[in-house]
Amino acid sequence: MNGIPTKSIKKFYTLLFSGKISESEKTLEYIRKKLGEENSYYNALYGIYYSYVNDDLDSYIFKLWERYLSGVDKKTLQNEIKKLIDESHEPPSNFLQAWIDLVNIIDQLPTPHKIEKKEAKPIEESIEETGIVEDIEEERQSSNIEKNILVRRLGNQ
């Protein structure tokens, strides 16, 4: 993994995808110091970090995870990246290697917390569909009616 131990790269991704952003940033800073700011492997990691932290849902990192979580196997994902390498004119090999390395360990990483939250959204929608929200609203309205009746009674005394 480009002169950086696999353990450090895995730690960066684990922290990032677990939502421990400041800790992942410290690990990324360690990697930057080891590789240098101009290193294309570091730049790929920084791009992944930046896209993830800024919720760029159209970025490759989110698309990669969505495809992986929907059942696309690692080998297919690796082949797609290798195809990009083959089709590119003099691609920065270290940059693309960072993506290959991510796919190689993707099954060892936690599901990104931002994707988990996004997947949880339909649960909230299903709660609305079950009528729980309407039941709460009806209770609130009947409570207001009871309160108004009580206020009028007290006012008439």
Image: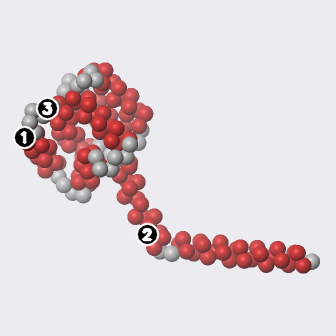
Residue name at image x 17 percent, y 39 percent: 100
Q: How many marks?
A: 3
- Of the residues under marks 1 and 2, which one precedes in the sequence? 1
What colouring method underlies this structural image?
Answer: secondary structure
Between circles 1 and 2, the one closer to the viewer is 1
Q: Quadrant of residue 34?
A: top left
Q: Secondary structure at mark 3?
A: helix
Circle nearer the viewer, 2 or 3: 3
* 79 left or right of 66 in image: left
Give, as a three-letter code, the residue at label 3: Ser
Residue 42 higher or lower than 147, as above or below? above
Q: Please tell me which of labels 3 and 1 falls first in the chain.
A: 1
Residue 17 visible in this rendered orientation of the protein: no
Give the residue type at disc 1: Asp
Assess disc 3: are there few (<14), some (14-19) or many (≥20) residues with their C-alpha within 10 Å of its C-alpha: few
Spatial CA span between label 3 and label 1: 11 Å
What residue is drawn where x is 15% and y is 31%? 92
- Cα separation between marks 2 and 3: 46 Å
Residue 152 position, x and y percent, is 83, 77
Are the two marked residues, 1 and 2, in contact with CB atoms closer than 8 angstroms?
no
Quarter of the image holding residue 44?
Answer: top left
Image marks 3 and 1: residues in contact by CB distance under 8 Å: no
The Cα–Cα distance between marks 1 and 2, rounded to whole angstroms, is: 45 Å
Q: Earlier in the sequence, mark 2 or mark 3?
A: 3
**Furthest residue toward right:** 157
Label 1: state its secondary structure.
Answer: helix
Pointer 2 residue: 126
**Residue picked out by circle 1:** 86
In the image, residue 91 above or below residue 70: above
Q: Which residue is mark 3?
A: 93
